[in-house]
Amino acid sequence: MPCQSSEELKELVEEAKKHTPNGRVASYIPALGKANPNDLSIAIYYPDGRCISAGNVEQEITLQSISKVISLALALKDRGPDCVFKRVGMEPTGDPFNSIAKLETMAPAKPLNPMINAGALVVTHMIKGDSVEERFERLLSFIREMANDPSIGYSEEVARSEFETANLNRALCYFLKEHRVINENVEQLMDLYTKQCAIEMNCLALARIGLVIGMDGVDPQTGEQVLPKDIARICKTFMVTCGMYNASGEFAIKIGIPAKSGVSGGIMGAVPGRFGIGIFGPALDERGNSIAGIKLLEMLSNNYKLSMF
C-alpha cells in the first residue's frame, strides 16, 4: 500500500522546520556533514498497512544510533537477557553518548546501558557469527525482515567515513578489552559497528520497524512474531529511558513515547499498540537529536495524546 501524503502532517512539518536554523548537521562524520540542514520528513505506519507522510520520505538515511535498538534485539535473541546484561547495564546516564567517564569509575568496567556507544559496542560484539561478514549479514537480514524490505543495504561511503574517524570508539573498545568485557580484535569490531551504523533506509521503512516494536514484536501484516514479545518490551523500555541520549528524561516528560534517535537526524518512534514513526531532520541540537524532529514529535504527542504516561 503506497504512503499517502497528509496535509495535516505537512502543516506540522512546516511549523517544526522553523527550528532547523538552531541546529547543526553532524559534520564530525564527514559523509554526514553533506546533509541539507533544512530537510524534514515523516512517515507514520499503521497496523492495517496504511501509511501517511509529509516531506521527502523516499530519501535514504543511515541509521546511526537507531541501529543500537535492533542490534540489542538480535543480541538478546542470540544470547538471552542474562548473558547480555551481565556485560551491559540497564541504567540511564546523564553523560554524553560517547563518554568514557563512567567506565573509569565503575567496577567492573561495565557500560551503563546499550544505547550509549560503549554499551552498543559490547552488544554488537555479542552478535553471533564466524566473521564480520556473517554477523553483519545476519543483522541486515533481521532489519530487512522487520522493515519488510529486502532491498535495504548500507552506505559504503558513510561506513568508511566513520571507520576512518572513529578514534573515540576505538578508545572505548580498547578500554573494554583491557577489562575483558570484549575479547575480539578491535578493528574487526569497528568494521562491524561502523557498517551497522551505516545501514540505510527511508522513513517509511524506519516507521515500519517502529511499528513492529510497538506491536510487541508482531508484524501486523503477516501476524508473524518477528521479535519475541519480551525482547520487544526490553527494547521499548530502553527507548523510553535512554533512547534520546542525555535528553531522554525531558523527552519522556514532553513527548512520552518509546523513541530512538541517530546523529544522521533520524528518529524511530514506536507508539505502543498504535503505529510506528520514522522521521528525518539532519539539523541536530547540542545533545545530538534532530532539533526539528523533536519539535515535530512534541506537536504530534500534544495533538493526539500519544504519551504513555
Image (spheres, grey):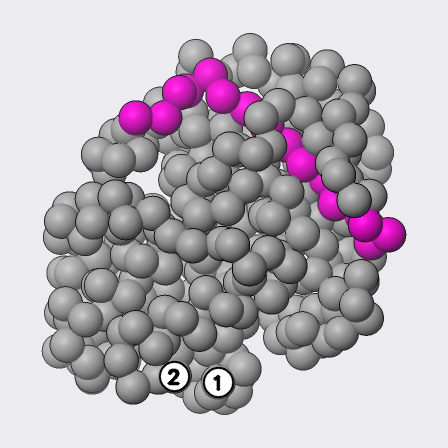
Which of 179/223 is in front? 223
Few, some or many residues within 10 Å of mark 1 (<14, 14–19, 20+) = some
* Residue in view at x 57 percent, y 34 percent: 58
The dominant secondary structure in magenta is loop
Amino acid type at image mark 1: Asp
Residue situated furthest right in the rendering: 48
Residues at circles 1 and 2 in contact by the CB criterion of under 8 Å? yes
Residue 144 in view (yes/no): yes
Residue numbers of the magenta segment? 34-49
Tell me the residue that label 1 is attached to.
78
**Residue in the foreground of this view, choosing between 104 and 118:** 118
- Residue that appears at 70% across and 69% down: 217
Q: Residue 208: percent from the left, percent from the top? A: 67, 52
Q: Which residue is pictured at 34% across the width and 47% down the height?
A: 155
| Local secondary structure at mark 2 | loop
Specify the quadrant that holds the N terminus: top right
The residue wearing badge 2 is 128
| Position of 187 relative to 79 (above/below) | above
Q: Position of residue 80 (x, y in %)?
A: 52, 87
In the rendered view, does 303 fall on the left or right side of 39?
right
| SS label for mark 1 | helix
Residue 250 sits in which quadrant? top right
Let me know if residue 89 appears in the view: no
43 on left or right of 306: left
* Residue 90: assigned label: none
Pinpoint residue 96: horizontal percent, then vertical percent: 34, 47
Q: Name which residue lies at 22% across and 63% down.
A: 191
Q: How many marks?
A: 2
Tell me which corner region of the image, top left, top right, bottom left or bottom right, holds residue 53.
top right
Q: Of callouts 1 and 2, which one flags the residue occurring earlier in the amino acid sequence?
A: 1
